[in-house]
Structures are given as C-alpha cells and as structure tokens.
C-alpha cells in the first residue's frame, strides 16, 4: 500500500523554518518513507510525505510535524527576546 500526505504551512516565518529543518532532509530518515520540503513564495512551506505503509507514514508525520513545530517555537521565543 502506498500512502502520501501533504501539508502547506502559511506563515511569515516559512523561510526561517525551511532553513532550520532543511539539514534534516540530508539524513536518511527511513527507507520506507520519502520526505519532500519546498518553499513557495516566501510564506508557504510545503511538506510532502510518501510512505510504504501506515506505520512509516505515522512515524514520518510525527517527526516532521514536530520538527516544524519546534522551529516555529524557537523563532517565537527569539522574537520575544528582541
């Protein structure tokens, strides 16, 4: 069974989040899932996950949604300190 999911995050910090998580794409996350991350315009981050099965899709979703959330939280904290 082949599965896929695509999420579009529209935020003013899309480019900063993209740059923050981009190095993670170089790591081999799983052989059963493929991750795509693109920046559209300057305010849209598009995350695409293709997986062989539901377990690997869930795992990839948990990992990548959490990475994006952490990057946003760090940016929020950093902007508060200014």
Image (cartoon, rainbow, N blue to C red):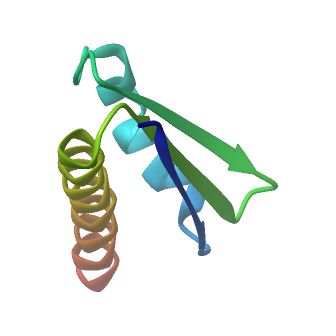
* Coordinates of residue 32 in the picture (x, y in percent): 29, 23
Q: Quadrant of residue 51?
A: top left
Kindly identify the residue that appears in the image at 30 percent across and 60 percent down.
65
24 on left or right of 70: right
Q: Nearer the viewer, residue 17 or 30?
A: 30
Residue 20 lies, with reference to residue 22, above or below; the image says: below
How far across and how far down the image is residue 52, in percent? 35, 31
**Closest to the observer, 1 or 7:** 1
In the foreground, 72 or 60: 60
Position of residue 53 measured from the top left corner of the image (x, y, whole percent): 29, 39
User: On the rendered image, what quadrant is the C terminus found in?
Assistant: bottom left
- Image point (57%, 60%), residue name: 14
* Residue with the most extreme front position: 1
**Is residue 15 placed above or below 24 in the rendered structure?**
below
Give the image location of residue 77, x and y in percent.
Answer: 22, 77
- At x 34%, y 68%, the residue is 72
């Amino acid at each position: 069974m082949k599965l896929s999911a695509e999420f579009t995050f529209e935020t003013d910090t899309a480019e900063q989040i993209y740059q923050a998580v981009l190095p993670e794409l170089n790591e081999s996350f799983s052989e059963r899932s493929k991750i795509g991350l693109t920046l559209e315009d300057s305010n849209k981050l598009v995350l695409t996950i293709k997986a062989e099965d539901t377990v690997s899709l869930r795992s990839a979703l948990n990992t990548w949604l959490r990475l994006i959330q952490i990057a946003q939280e760090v940016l929020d904290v950093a902007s508060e300190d200014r």
